[in-house]
Amino acid sequence: MQEKPNPVALRMLKQRSDILENLKGIKFKIAVMSGKGGTGKTTVAVNLAAVLSRKNSVGLLDADIDCPNINSFLGIKERFSVKGENRIQPIERFGLKVVSMASLQEEADTAIMWRGPMISTGLNSFLQNTDWGKLDFLVIDMPPGTSDAALSIMQNVDLAGIVVVSTPQGVALTDASKAINMAKKFNVKVLGLVENMSGEIFGEGEVESLAKKLGETFLGGIELRKEIRQLAEKGLIAVNESREAEKEFKAIAQIVLKQLGVQKNG
Ligand SMILES: Nc1ncnc2c1ncn2[C@@H]1O[C@H](COP(=O)(O)OP(=O)(O)OP(=O)(O)O)[C@@H](O)[C@H]1O
Ligand SMILES: [Mg+2]
C-alpha cells in the first residue's frame, strides 16, 4: 500500500519552493549572524549593505521579527505598501531596499490586513511575499541565536554564505563558533568572521585567532568607537559619515566579494 504523504512536510516543501522562486532574482543572499546578542550584527548588516550598494543593487532584510532594529538604524518611519496579490513593497532608503517587521507595527490599513498572517508565519511571509525585483545582493540581519529565524533562513533560503560577527570576549567567541557549526550542518558557506568593538575595552585579535583556529576567513575588524553608536541612533549609516568606518567596512566588503568570487563590484 502506498504511504499517504505527510501534509506538514508537503506544506513545508511547498513553502520552500515558493521562497526560492520569490528570491530567484537575487544573485547573492548573505546572512549576518552571531550566536550572542548585541555583538553588532545590525551594525555590520547595514554598513556592509551600504558599501555594496555603491556599485550594486542591494536589499536589506531584517530577520529579527521580535525586536526589529533596522528601521531605527536607518531612520525609517514609513509603513509598507502592499500591491496586487499581497506583494510587500520594500521601503527605499539610502539607495537600499529595506524590509523590516517594524514597518508593520502601526495601524495603517495594510498593516492591519497583514498583521495576523505575518505574525503567524513571520519571516517566511517576508521571504515569500516581498517584491524585491532584481538585486545583486540581499543582506539579511539575523536575530541572535541559532534557533527560529536562523533555522528558517538556513532551511529556506539559498544562501551564498554567512558573515559571523563577534566581539573579542570569550562568551561571544563561543557563541560565534555555534553559529559557524550550524552553518556547516546546513552546508552553508562561512564567508568569514568580523571582529566588532575591538579595542582596549573588549580586546583585540581574538576573532582573528578564532578564525585561524577554525580554518575560516577573517574579514576584518571594527573598532569600538562612540560615533558608530551615535550615528546609528541618528538614523545615519556610519560608512557614509565617517572615513574610519568607511575604511573598515570597505575592507570587509572586499573580502566578502572575493569569497563570493566577485572581483570588481566593491
Ligand atoms: N564598533 C562599534 N562601536 C560603538 N558602538 C557600536 C559598535 N558596533 C555596534 N555598536 C552599538 O552597539 C549596540 C548593539 O549593536 P547592534 O544593534 O548592531 O548589535 P546586534 O548584534 O544587532 O544586537 P541584537 O543581538 O540585539 O540584534 C548598538 O547601539 C550599536 O550602535
Ligand atoms: Mg540586531
Image (cartoon, rainbow, N blue to C red):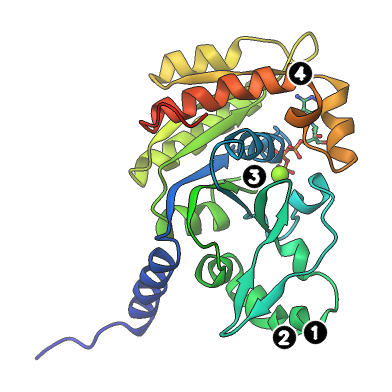
**SS of the residue under disc 1:** helix
- Left or right of 205? Residue 42 is right
Q: Nearer the viewer, mark 3 or mark 1?
A: 1
Quarter of the figure with residue 216: top left
Q: Amino acid at mark 2?
A: Met
Do the CB atoms of the residues marked 2 and 1 lie less than 8 Å apart? yes
Alpha carbon of mark 4 to alpha carbon of mark 2: how far?
A: 43 Å
Q: Which mark is residue 243?
A: 4
Image location of residue 10, percent across then percent down:
33, 79
- Residue drawn at the location 63% of the way across and 80% of the way down: 83
**SS of the residue under disc 3:** loop
Above-or-below relation of 1 to 224: below
- Which numbered disc flags the more N-terminal residue, 4 or 2? 2
Q: Amino acid at mark 3?
A: Pro
**Nearer to the camera, 136 or 256:** 136
Mark 1 surroundings within 10 Å by alpha-carbon count, few (fewer than 14), some (14 through 19), many (20 or more): some
**Nearer to the camera, 232 or 179:** 232
Q: Which mark is residue 144?
A: 3
Above-or-below relation of 133 to 45: below
Give the residue pinned by disc 1: 109
